[in-house]
Amino acid sequence: MNEVYLLWESYKTNKILAIGVLKQLSDDKYSFKYFDTAKVAMEQGCFLPFPYSEEEMFFETLPDFFEQRILKGDFNTYKFDLKNEKNKLNYLVYRDSIKNSDNFKIVSEEKFQKMK
């Protein structure tokens, strides 16, 4: 998997808005690009993971916003039947990386295409 999609469910409308796409360029290099709908999300109260930009952003490591959503530890790897892979994007789409503290989810390209 080389790319995942960041989605946000609006508090006001309960609609899912596409925020942007995270791509893995190489082992430790990533890029993130916002979609135009990220501006709509901001207007509805979404706190974006990075300051909004129309330019693609590049990172030397997986950005903290995404890194902190990954299940970590041997217990979780065993419990949730995750293989110890180098590709962190595979971990990010597990259960859509949903947290109780926000309205974000991270999905695979396949799942994103089905949602359109």
Image: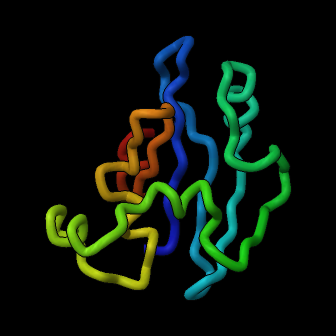
Q: 59 left or right of 104?
A: right
Residue 66, position in %: x, y? Answer: 55, 58
What colour-coding does the image apply? rainbow
The image shows residue 40, relative to residue 69, as above or below, that is: above
The image shows residue 86, relative to residue 36, as above or below, that is: below
Q: Which residue is drawn at 50% across and 39% down?
A: 104
- Tag count in the figure? 0
Q: Quadrant of residue 74?
A: bottom left
Q: Residue at x 84, y 57 (%)?
A: 55
Residue 103, position in %: x, y? Answer: 49, 32
Q: Which residue lies furthest to the top in this view?
A: 12
Q: Residue at x 78, y 64 (%)?
A: 57
Q: 94 left or right of 104?
A: left
| Quadrant holding the C terminus | top left
In-front residue for pair 17/12: 12
Residue 13, position in %: x, y? Answer: 52, 13
Q: In which quarter of the image is residue 31?
A: bottom right
Q: Residue at x 57, y 40 (%)?
A: 18
In-front residue for pair 30/84: 84
In-front residue for pair 36/84: 84
| Quadrant holding the N terminus | bottom left
